[in-house]
Image (cartoon, coloured by chain):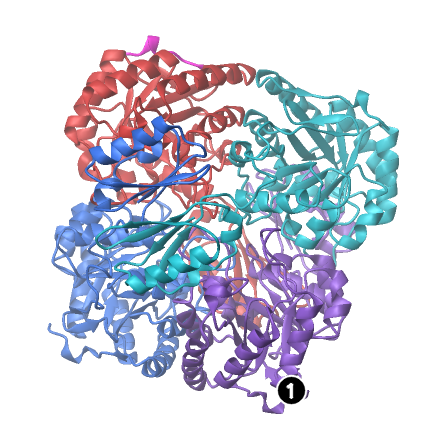
Chain colours: A blue, B red, C cyan, D purple
Amino acid sequence: MIIVLKPHPSPELIQHVVDRIRELGFTPHLSQGVSRTIIGVIGDEEKLQVQPLQAIEGVEQVVPILKPYKLASREFHAEDSQFEIKGIKVGRGHLLMIAGPCAIESEPILVEIAEKVKEAGANLLRGGAFKPRTSPYSFQGLGEDGLKILKATGERFAMPVVTEVMDPRQIDLVVKYADMIQIGARNMQNFDLLKEVGRTRLPILLKRGLAATVKDLLMSAEYILSQGNRRVILCERGVKSFEDSTRNMLDLSIVPNVKGMSHLPIIVDPSHATGRPDLIPAMARASVAAGADGVHIEVHSCPEKALSDGPQALLPNQYAALMDDLRALAGVMGQKIDSCEGVTV
Amino acid sequence: MIIVLKPHPSPELIQHVVDRIRELGFTPHLSQGVSRTIIGVIGDEEKLQVQPLQAIEGVEQVVPILKPYKLASREFHAEDSQFEIKGIKVGRGHLLMIAGPCAIESEPILVEIAEKVKEAGANLLRGGAFKPRTSPYSFQGLGEDGLKILKATGERFAMPVVTEVMDPRQIDLVVKYADMIQIGARNMQNFDLLKEVGRTRLPILLKRGLAATVKDLLMSAEYILSQGNRRVILCERGVKSFEDSTRNMLDLSIVPNVKGMSHLPIIVDPSHATGRPDLIPAMARASVAAGADGVHIEVHSCPEKALSDGPQALLPNQYAALMDDLRALAGVMGQKIDSCEGVTV
Amino acid sequence: MIIVLKPHPSPELIQHVVDRIRELGFTPHLSQGVSRTIIGVIGDEEKLQVQPLQAIEGVEQVVPILKPYKLASREFHAEDSQFEIKGIKVGRGHLLMIAGPCAIESEPILVEIAEKVKEAGANLLRGGAFKPRTSPYSFQGLGEDGLKILKATGERFAMPVVTEVMDPRQIDLVVKYADMIQIGARNMQNFDLLKEVGRTRLPILLKRGLAATVKDLLMSAEYILSQGNRRVILCERGVKSFEDSTRNMLDLSIVPNVKGMSHLPIIVDPSHATGRPDLIPAMARASVAAGADGVHIEVHSCPEKALSDGPQALLPNQYAALMDDLRALAGVMGQKIDSCEGVTV
Amino acid sequence: MIIVLKPHPSPELIQHVVDRIRELGFTPHLSQGVSRTIIGVIGDEEKLQVQPLQAIEGVEQVVPILKPYKLASREFHAEDSQFEIKGIKVGRGHLLMIAGPCAIESEPILVEIAEKVKEAGANLLRGGAFKPRTSPYSFQGLGEDGLKILKATGERFAMPVVTEVMDPRQIDLVVKYADMIQIGARNMQNFDLLKEVGRTRLPILLKRGLAATVKDLLMSAEYILSQGNRRVILCERGVKSFEDSTRNMLDLSIVPNVKGMSHLPIIVDPSHATGRPDLIPAMARASVAAGADGVHIEVHSCPEKALSDGPQALLPNQYAALMDDLRALAGVMGQKIDSCEGVTV
């Protein structure tokens, strides 16, 4: 940590800061120039970061050196993490291909979609039973009935399944049906929810919030990891921006950025990021080329009648064509997409 | 709702869209030009908005006309809303002046701060018992112990108190101690939490999310209102932006913007918005001049030792000087700040 | 400047960085911990800032301490600057009230508007002769004919006039007619244009760019100041954001922020910032309460027939009512609005 | 164009709007419901777009249907455009690979870099002679001396060259030395400069502004096209955002987005977008997979001594390794990178 004092600090101020640092058990290193003084503090920065030294009158700036996350960092775990979700590998060259409808609407519709996406090469089935909708008057999901349909459909096609939880009170229910739990973008900083899913033994798909920096995302992962759950998969799904022709702005540079800072796998969801089926395939291809550990795509067999987010879904045949492209690109990148053959039902 | 078709639509497409609209019980109005066709649909737009007509191949754009919120709208309730919080009025010219520390740290510290802010003219005391911290290793709040301190201190000074809930499971506890419940920015779209606080009988202070538009904020208010709780106070506290010299960007234009769209009171929190004590007083003054229904300020008697957000707190004497300015400006604006004399303990 | 090395730096790297700093004529201060090393360099930071030390393999971060602007800084000029524009004062409690149409359309229309805004209390007349329009097919301004109308109208009402230049080749022409030159938001980083207006002897109204930080704005002011022209007035006019119900987002906190960093006056333009006449009066009031040195408002006597930006103009009677409010608020703030009586035609 | 009136419009208002539309030579189509009235106008929207119908009291919203750009649109030119720059093709499957230093510093340094990037497969050499620097005290470029070095080096290696112009007065000089002219991000809405380069016969590389939407970018291209110059290449180079770990945010979705709206080629510059050599290769790969028509990369043989933007440059060997990846990905995408063999010196 570096403490920069305002120009021409008084000897009393310097002494006060030095005393505070010593009180906290650290050794200050002073660098003094004609008008400027900076104080370096090297040591366990965690203890320092919670101290509001910035609030001392006369301190201009406090510059942290160490990162505020630990378990999520590359320093803590140098090698890329790799997990298995019921036999499907993700990380270290294994791509997770999640597909399915936004919401679970009925068993026949989900079965139809699941059959098609599995055939195309998806290795994980998604579907929402609890839906975060901006309007209280929109379809809110089928709840437990939806979870039952999801589990049954996953077993029928030997695909692991993922679904979102929005409320800590839903977790006990969801763990009975899901193979992976999704934390949606709007709940990325719902810290109580993060702690609770950190106590489950299921892998967690943590979506980036709409105004979250990469550091914020890793701090939220840290909440889950700190509870003992090490299977966290990050997911980029676009951030808010001024561009009004797409739903959000896909920030693909977060993929190599995360790879430098953390060992955790990161996948990309171009469906929510762009909100436009005409842009999704290009962005899915770009995600694989950027080094993402997987792609999350919404697919619906009749988007114009979907109960949620229909306008952004790909048709099953569009998804199949895209998967052909992704396999070819993954080949060039030295990566592979596991099939569902080894899934342990 | 207006449906704009892509250039040179086929007669089959036009018929398909017209049929879908009729199926839904509406009358389509066609306007056809040489290359362009638009279809107007007038009626109960709520029913239409959940239909993904945008997903029909050949539809270029769907433009809603009616607003997606209803109970929050000016159309529903023409006059400004006014509420009482234990005798303190807010709305229609009555300003709510909330002050207090970020977190409740101990009874002596809270008592010291409460005494000072009440003397300066604050009419509502704030303090966090459950703290949303970006790091799992930071101080997370005193929990129920904090709530007890808050309630006791409020009663001692005859000030109503407000505190944040982050988890639906905390609500039963918090209603025993608080006079108003705060929903923080990070939970503005935690829809389960919104529904739950909508079922309480306490007024709700709903803070704008960091990437929420004014429409998003009103939709979240609608979640609470739709559960039967009509006492919702909105709060602007800054949004994410590229400007890196302030914590967030205070969007003060939301004050008159909300006033045009909704009857709900809206207050401003310049402490979280700017994160800088040197900017807070000017932004508090600007808030009153912009027509805000109140101002929310963090105050601490020793910011450099505060357990949370110390660097952004005003000192008690800075707060007192600011309140003098705000009273003068409120006078010019034809508004007043109620004292705590009439508080019903 | 502080140079933070990556964890566990080799002795060779430390020596390489130390050597580079010494080569440049500075003294490095080393602080070494178990895993971390930081190197402080105190001295003439300007010389250092142009050195890409960040590019050295093994350097994690370079943290500047000194500000990159100099003539614009408070350190250079401690007291608030105050200028006169043909007898109208701005700064140190004197508010500049600029009003007029977006574009100069004809002499009768400008005369009608000028008469009304002067009567209401405006002390500077604006009007565009060269218009930056996003479409090449929109009205581009009357050019020199417009400048002649502006000058004649200003003289008729004894009001100084301001107009925009977009191209260095227009400057010789514009200085013959204008009393102040405006640099528009889109040209805030048109560095050749900044240098050229820096060589004139007219005061410059420098508008903040749509994606400019406060530091960027001060750096652009520095370009003008460094050419010898010290009469620079900054202007906040909104920045790009995700909020889609206003044209831009007015960042009013830049007013006290600039006051802390710089001695230059700063005014606010709520017309371009919000693009909505229903929000302009509240934001103009907030600007004065925030401590702005003036307000810039577009006024048109028939907005629905204006050739440029009609939808955002106030009507003359709306402007007059607003000026009454602003005078009252200025009184509370200890500020005054000079009349045009002392204007030296 | 669709005109939405406020709820419960008076018959007089409806008549007034209808009259205005008829005056302008259009036929209004009325759709009236219980509370809502909308008016469709089909026809030459250009003429309508310049009319401020939004300013009519009682009009809630004006929704344009036709796009404000014409020559840049897919409707105007259905097939992808393809240009040649001295024999190097761009568009329709031919990738433009631009590489070189940020600024031209000296002939030996440029020759060294040019040799390496050509060997690696770059087919166009870049280098700045006029540099837009945020500080007036930073290196501003070598001017004409730099242009001479650039031209000589391009001829030596049979590579076409591109360089930036910032001021209309530089154009006559630059056309003597350059094969393509770059308009930088800060000048994307410098409309006088756009018109002037539109009058040259050189291809123009138009970089997206930091706060420009895709529509803004196409409107700026329209300025150039409307002067008769049809060889415009768009370039994404990142936009401003809240993410503070990268210089800007690369918005790769603009690539397929532009492809849907326009026939113009679009390339990507990950160097300026990310500002970080560790992220550039992944983003360059993603650009090709997203369907970009080329990639623009800054390369320097000694970044730590570069006079401009050193920290973001790739080393020549990093560039060569990246080009191997890009060739493989281009193969999968059915695209090719032309060598400089056919260059017509």
**Where does the image place residue D216, in percent across and percent down from the top left?**
61, 59
Q: Residue at x 63, y 22 (%)?
A: C93
| Residue B175: quadrant of the picture | top left
- Chain bearing tag 1 is D
Task: Give the quadrant of the N terminus of chain D.
Answer: bottom right
Q: Residue A290 lies in magenta, yes or no?
A: no
Q: Residue at x 19, y 77 (%)?
A: A340
Task: Give the quadrant of the C terminus of chain D.
Answer: bottom right
Does residue C183 appear to the left or right of C29 in the view shown?
right
Does residue A207 appear to the left or right of B49 in the view shown?
left
From this viewpoint, is residue B32 visible?
Answer: no
In this view, the residue in front, A246 or A310, is A246
Q: Secondary structure at mark 1?
A: loop
Amino acid at the residue labelled 1: Gly
Q: Residue at x 67, y 73 (%)?
A: D76
- Work out whether C12 lies above or below C268: below
The magenta stretch spans which residues? B337-344
In this view, the residue in front, B2 or D301, is D301
**Where does the image place residue A205, in percent across and percent down from the top left?**
24, 60
From this viewpoint, is residue D90 visible?
Answer: yes
In this view, the residue in front, C220 or D3, is C220
- Work out whether C38 lies above or below B102: below
Tell me the crowding category of disc 1: few under 14, some 14 to 19, or many 20 or more residues within 10 angstroms, Cα based. Answer: some
- Work out whether B109 lies above or below A270: above
Q: Residue placed farthest to the top in the image?
A: B341
Q: Residue at x 81, y 28 (%)?
A: C115
The residue singled out by tag 1 in the image is: D87
- Work out whether B83 lies above or below B62: above
| Residue C275: quadrant of the picture | top right
In this view, the residue in front, C312 or D177, is D177
